Amino acid sequence: MSGTLIDFCKQLEPTALKLPAALLQAARDGVEFQHHFPTTREEPWKYTRLGRVAALKLTPVNINQSAERLPASDTIDIIFEHETWHCAEPTAGLHIDFSGDLDASAWNACTLQGHVQHINALSAQGGVAIRVDANTTLIKPIRIIHRLQGEHTGLILHHQLVLGNHASAQVEVFFEGTSEDSYANVLFDFFIGAGANLHADMLQQTKGTHYGFHTQRIYQQKDSTFALQTLTANTHFTRNEVEVFSQEEGTHTQLYGAFIGRENNHIDNHTYVHHKAPNCTSDENYKGVLADKATGVFNGKVKVYQDAQKINAYQSNKNILLSDSASINAKPELEIYADDVKCSHGSTTGQLDQHALFFLRARGISETKATDMLIKGFMAEIVGAVKSIHIQEALHALLD
Amino acid sequence: MAGYTENELAKDLADKEYQYGFISEIDSDVVPPGLNEQVIHLISAKKNEPAWLLDYRLKAFEVWKTMTEPEWAHVAYQKPDFQAISYYAAPKQTKKFESWDDVDPEMKETMAKLGISLEEQQRLTGVAVDFVMDSVSVGTSFKAKLAELGIIFCSFSEAVQEHPALVQQYLGTVVPITDNFYAALNSAVFSDGSFCYIPKGVRCPMELSTYFRINAGGTGQFERTLVIADESSYVSYLEGCTAPQRDENQLHAAVVELIALNNAEIKYSTVQNWYPGDKEGKGGVFNFVTKRGLCEAHAKISWTQVETGSAVTWKYPSCILKGDYSVGEFFSVAVTNNYQQADTGTKMIHLGKHTKSTIISKGISAGHSQNSYRGLVQIHKQADHARNFSQCDSLLMGSVSGAHTFPYIECKNASAQIEHEATTSKIGEDQLFYCQQRGISEEKAISLIVNGYCKEVLNQLPMEFAVEAQKLLSISLEGSVG
């Protein structure tokens, strides 16, 4: 069986994910209604063309699960490779499940927004369900690696991570490998219990003409903290959608991101923070460097609902263009319905500081080296927020 | 303690009556409601227009019929029924006035109520005023004096008769008929407006001013303004607007085109005070305006606006920075109250090299109002060393008002430098405390803070208008500003 993505949605049996009927119908209506892919006339896709994606001929990836356990290492590994999930032995208080049997109560809190999520809801082939018991602090980080390969593959996954009250965990997510004319739509739902703390780092560095769509939906309960670092390096096509629902008082959210684009890369970051409860803070910082003919998009939105007083929301987006053929489209948005708030955003676009470049070159450093140093310095703020040692190493290798 | 709290201020704002809400008892010559080709023929005939203009109107009407109303703005309103509007309403007395004594006393009184008594302005302020009531331009003062310098400042219909070549050359060059729904509608049915031409190298010695007023019920106002500043000239142009208090929504869809040729400078200031509707959000003017300027090399266009009126505002004064080294500026204060909705901002299109733009936008929302800034900064590929700075601040008064920011930044050139920043907050308790601690009453402190907040923009207004703008702000924010 193969076909375009729309055929995909039609042919696949609704997933084993036990989606509530209402959500499934909403997704079906969404895709049915459109009968086509969103065009640049639609606001969320204003700067990202999907023509190539719509034309892709895809074959679904079979998903198996290996009975063998991965050897223990400094992380709890979950690896998807050669159409198979491999998993290390979970530690106490941690549960990892591949049956697609996601927490139904958590599902009810979900909403479906837009094309990427509709496609995912209709045709997700499975995913990993991770649960951390209440009051558990995981010592080792959980490492999830997606190693993509092959041509014309279509991989649609829906992961879920439920963090019990007052639990604490660290997650590292990788997208790597080489894949041509392929499609991946990977959605993560993070349910963060009261007082819980989750730190997630994600590195996207697939090679080849791979079209990657990544959605992170975060549901935060009272006094929880969540930090996500999204790092995208030289991927052919990436669309990131991060949606945070701050549902109860006292939450803190940190969304950091860095993207580096070369050649014909297209990297699109959308974030949407819903402040539904009072006394919360959010801090957003995205940085991009684009060279050659790369294009970048940043669209960050903060919405403060009417009764959500005492919100402190900050959003920053800085971009550097290294070539005249590169382009960036930024749209930082604020939508505020409460009065006692402090919300601000800033966005800058420019080139590398010529004075700084001259300073370095005057000291005998080559132009290439000096440029690399300045970019590294520019990115340091984001890279420094990454906790994952593996991702830190990968980034240093990339930036040096 | 005679406490004047923010809540009281918010209440004052809500209670404030619209003081320009009078209706002048002047006979008007109104075309029956509805829009079709016949009406356009009728308008054109009434104004004795040349054939090319009628063609232009009919073409615009054809285009308009294929368009739909824009829905992307962050406003919600009952869409106007375009067939229920009368597209032409002129005060009946259409003969030209030789001296101001000939003017209908009722109309003179209207002007006096608006605080723009022409005689007084002529004598005291030296501002040349073109007064547009409903659809027709009533009179332009100081015309002779301006004519000595070769400056043409007259009503649009007069310009069509007397300077058809200029009008034909520039009309629709900045805002084409296909631009948007309301611009197309305006192009089809515009009735009058102002026309201004400043010849080469002339610095206009006085502020030129237009006052718009919608008077007749059930009408829409569709005026057209065209300002052409020839090479190395300078002009400062002021525009003011009011409307009577009515239960129904009135439509105002104007088009303003500015053309600044090489080295020219145009300063365009607006104080907009259309009737905003009552406390329950009933009535008020729908203000759907397209304003755009084109800058040739080394030219500069500066938009300054103080927006206090209208039930719904949809307005984006823009600059096309076509020539190298051209400069665009946008300074705005938008105050919304009760159920007013404003979606306003600017577009800066950088096409030329070394072009610069500055955007300073200040929003104040009180009551149940929604105030949005929507702006576009676009740097094209060939626009080397373009520079933009944007600052959009919002001040919230009252827990049910909303303030929103939607900036679009599109950059296709690596040498461009773009900065954008926005903040949203209410009047800081710490700022209030600081003032009060120094013996300044709460009321004065709020006034001080609001004044300071808007100062950057108010400073840009010409003297005559700055006073009026201050007055308007103090009406909108009674007891706190002034």
Image (tube, coloured by chain):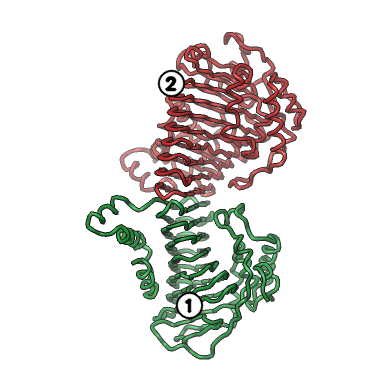
Marks counted in the figure total 2
Give residue A258's quadrant in the image: bottom left
Q: Which chain is red?
A: B
Give residue A252's quadrant in the image: bottom left
Q: Is mark 1 on a helix, strand or loop?
A: strand
Q: What element carries label 2?
A: loop
Q: The green chain is which one?
A: A
Query: Looking at the figure, which quarter contains the N terminus of chain A?
Result: bottom right
Q: Residue sitting at 46 percent across and 60 percent down?
A: A263
**Would you say residue B284 is visible in this rendering?**
no
Mark 1 and mark 2: Cα distance apart in space:
69 Å
Q: Circle 1 is placed at which residue position?
A: A145
Q: Circle 2 is placed at which residue position?
A: B201
Q: What residue type is labelled 2?
A: Gly
Query: Looking at the figure, which quarter contains the C terminus of chain A?
Result: bottom left
Q: Where is residue B13 in the image (x, y as percent from the top left)?
A: 52, 38
